[in-house]
Amino acid sequence: MKTTLLTAGALLLAACNYTPREVTPPATFTAAEPIPPRPTDVGDPLAGVMWMLNYDVSQFDTVWRWLHDDVPPGAARARAIAAATLVAVAELDRTDVRAEGLAAFDEAIPNYPTDERLPLWRAYVVWLEARDSKDRARIDAAFAGIRAASTDYQAFTLFGVTLAAGGWEDAPRALLEEASAAFATIVTDTASLQHATDGLDLDRSRRLWDSPIAPYNIPAMQAMSADLELRLGNKDKATVGYYTALKANHAARWPWRAEVQRRMENVDATEQAFAARPATAYAFGSQGLGAMGMPANPSPDPRFKGRVGNGSCTVCHTHVSTFDTGETAANVGWVKVKVARPKEVPNLQGIGLLLPDGAMPVPGGFGIGPYVDVAGPRDFPLRDDLFDGTTVLPAEPGVYFVAAQATVDGKTWQGYLPREFGKQWFIEVKAGQMLDVTDSPIVMSKLPEP
């Protein structure tokens, strides 16, 4: 028996106490992405629209002509024209295509009954026109349309509520509170998809995080939520949101990072800028002439050389990075971890945390959701090999303890990077260096009921 215990202890030491592997970070972590060729497959015209949104919105007119001249009529073209219209109206202030776009939505929606994005996108285009009219009756009716389009797949569609409220500088307090509550429902609905094993729910769950179609989804969501909380006077919540936005996923290369930092460090002044009339700051993801979610500016931000419009859509979706704009890269390193999925939660989507030593530590970095390289394939939701529990945690140089957390059916699951006999394992993070500890997966345990 003694020999068996000694052997087991030796195996545990060997399995859990090893030196992290230093690996080469993905190219997207350290350099600007090359712009891939524009997709021209007329059988998949939506790919061309997504390329334009992701890489260079100045190519809108080129893509628009291609949709009309080369893509044959039908449901696929109607959906692509509808999506392009959303980008044109929300991101580029192009109202000249709105009428044709609304007609395209009306053609596409019946042909794609499971694409819950389409009714929401249409409602949002209608909302923008109503909001700019300043006709309160039209505004109320248009917002009702957004609510009606946000009853299914709320992990995605409720962003219509948050964006509409956030982008309206005269939004009444009740509407801002509704948008704040919508963010909470987005989180809850996302968590409900953790039991998905196949089909539409699994596909949807994989599109909600940072990905090739939305490289900055998580930092932008956190920053947009912070803006709402600040407009409601909840300065502490706003500060937490801005901080999380700065420390999560791909925020180190996010072109809005410096503005988030400025807002966090100047919360009182930012609150006053939101309250000024006319406003001198816009919410992230808002739409206003030339709005970058920054202090009011009547022209597009010159840093982006036309590849980004007013920031309404691109705040999440652009592949433009600080490496493109010539800004100083954030001083971070990364830890690549793997979270083992419990049998009860086949689609676990947790949060990785890098925690400094001490009581009640403030996380130095967050890996929120599964890691998929933003330069990965567009069909990433179909690639099971890309969803193996891996996440990547960024942090400034320092020594950190690696932990993970998830909420499933209202219950908290936690785990930490294992070391022999339950000891905490601290890892030194260095700038520009990626450490891989996926050989020692984090095992999650459900916390007992209080």
Image (cartoon, grey):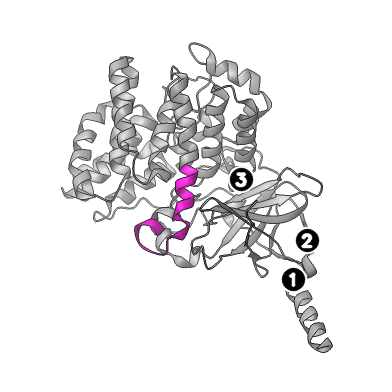
Seen as rendered, the residue at the extreme front is 450
Q: Disc 1 vs disc 2: Cβ atoms closer than 8 Å?
A: yes
The image quadrant where one finds the N terminus is: bottom right
Write the residue at 23% across / 35% down.
101
**Element type where label 3 sits in the image:** loop
Question: Dot 1 corresponds to which residue?
Answer: 16
Q: Which label is found at residue 248?
A: 3
Q: CA distance from mark 1 to mark 2?
A: 9 Å
Q: Is residue 367 left or right of residue 78?
A: right
Q: Is residue 268 left or right of residue 140?
A: right
Which is more N-terminal, label 2 or label 1? Answer: 1
Question: Dot 2 corresponds to which residue?
Answer: 425
**Element type where label 2 sits in the image:** loop
Q: Could you tell me residue 274's position as x and y percent?
A: 54, 18
The question of residue 189 being in magenta is answered with yes
Judge whether 404 appears above or below 166 on screen: below
Q: Is residue 117 left or right of residue 352?
A: left
**Element type where label 1 sits in the image:** helix
* Front one among 129 and 151: 151
The question of residue 349 being in magenta is answered with no
